[in-house]
Image: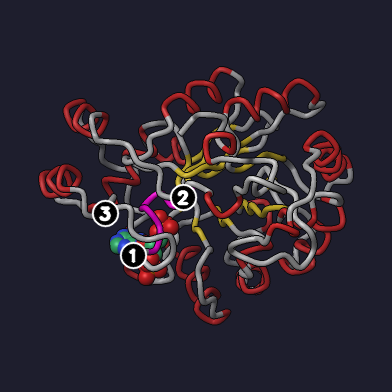
């Protein structure tokens, strides 16, 4: 994969860089985010992933504006993704306008429905209460997303945490097809069925928490400690994180590792000029599968549209 392989074209006609900096963290520190974004730009990242939920939009916007003012990068040279939080499903246009204000941008490159879920404003997080859930109408939410494109507020729209079934339902009424489905994906949750389906309907897959996430958030899922991956990393003289990210790239997805550490930001971008072997792939393909984020917190037997984890993922778990 040469430098031309660092981007892929979306069905919207724009190009998505294959390694993006994730910015989801528990305790956000704006200065730390700004420094991380500046470092990332310096080492070559041109893709930044945020969400209104992450509280990283403002600092990301400040850092990007700074870089533009200094002439280090031009707006059309970087790709920004943000996401519609479940409390604003009724009005994607207003929600995106707020995000754009935070980001100090005139448009984003990609706007995603963060979860297939509709919540009351001011809901409890991360575990919504019973009274926080509202009936879900993804058809009208998608119309709002399409309106964001028509207004020029985003170049492309997509979804996150959608199963094959939910994408199929969306495609049955969508005028603009989702360009991306951003989902949990790493060697211990490889998403083979979902990736095959998305490839068939020309939807690009992005991997969130490609390294398995921060151990103090949803708990470590063991991806970084996996002995098979460690052994492959040693063989190539690479780090475990690099092998995991390279594996994602060789599966044809974009990866969004979060790091605010200078060395790790740089390390996570050094994944383009080497490759895994067929034997490495074969070993990784045999790893036992276990989804880390099962979404249990948005399942209940009374008010949630999902009475069980199986319903949330339409049995694809
Ligand atoms: P830090 O920000 O201190 O680097 P994910 O992207 O899968 O959600 O994982 C994010 C977690 O992995 C964060 O805790 C981040 O911490 C850590 N991390 C990111 N890159 C690396 C790396 N190359 N090696 C080890 N840990 C990493």
Q: Which residue is tagged 1?
A: 264
Q: Quadrant of residue 220?
A: bottom left
Q: Which residue is mark 2?
A: 293
Locate residue 21, reporting x and y percent: 49, 58
User: For the residues marked 1 and 3, what is the alpha-carbon distance in whole angstroms?
Assistant: 14 Å
Q: Residues within 10 Å of mark 3 (few under 14, many from 20)?
A: many
Q: Which residues are magenta?
A: 208-214
Residue 218 is tagged as none
Q: Which residue is mark 3?
A: 224
221 in relation to 32, above or below: above
Observer-nearest of 195 and 222: 222
Classify mark 2: helix, strand or loop.
loop
Choose between 152 and 284: the one closer to the eye. 284
Q: Secondary structure at mark 1?
A: helix
Disc 2 from disc 1: Cα separation: 23 Å
Residue extending farthest to the top is: 200
Does the stretch in magenta take in 206? no
Q: Quadrant of residue 82?
A: bottom right
């Amino acid at each position: 994969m040469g430098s031309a392989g660092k981007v892929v074209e979306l069905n919207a006609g724009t190009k998505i860089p294959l390694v993006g900096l994730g910015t989801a963290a528990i305790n956000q520190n704006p200065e730390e985010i700004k420094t991380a974004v500046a470092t990332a730009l310096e080492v070559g990242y041109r893709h930044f992933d945020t969400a209104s939920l992450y509280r990283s939009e403002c600092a990301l916007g400040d850092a990007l504006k700074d870089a533009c003012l200094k002439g280090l990068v031009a707006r059309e040279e970087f790709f920004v993704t943000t996401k519609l939080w479940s409390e604003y499903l009724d009005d994607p246009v207003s929600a995106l306008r707020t995000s754009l204000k935070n980001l100090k941008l005139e448009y984003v490159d990609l706007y995603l429905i963060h979860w297939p879920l509709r919540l009351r404003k001011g809901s409890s997080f991360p575990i919504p209460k019973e009274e926080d859930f509202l009936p879900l109408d993804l058809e009208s939410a998608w119309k709002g997303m399409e309106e964001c494109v028509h207004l020029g507020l985003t170049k492309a729209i997509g979804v996150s945490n959608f199963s094959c079934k939910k994408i199929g339902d969306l495609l049955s009424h969508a005028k603009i097809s989702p360009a991306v489905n951003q989902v949990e994906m790493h060697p211990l949750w490889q998403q083979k069925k979902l990736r095959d389906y998305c490839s068939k309907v020309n939807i690009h897959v992005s991997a969130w928490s490609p390294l398995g996430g921060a151990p103090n958030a949803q708990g470590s899922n063991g991806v970084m400690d996996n002995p098979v991956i460690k052994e492959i990393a040693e063989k190539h003289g690479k780090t475990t994180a690099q092998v995991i990210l390279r594996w994602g790239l060789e599966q044809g997805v974009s990866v969004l590792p979060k790091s605010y550490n200078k060395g790790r930001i740089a390390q996570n971008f050094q994944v383009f000029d080497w490759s895994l072997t067929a034997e490495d792939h074969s070993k990784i393909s045999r790893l036992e599968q276990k989804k880390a984020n099962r979404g249990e917190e948005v399942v209940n037997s009374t008010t949630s549209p999902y009475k069980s984890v199986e319903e949330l993922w339409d049995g694809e778990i």
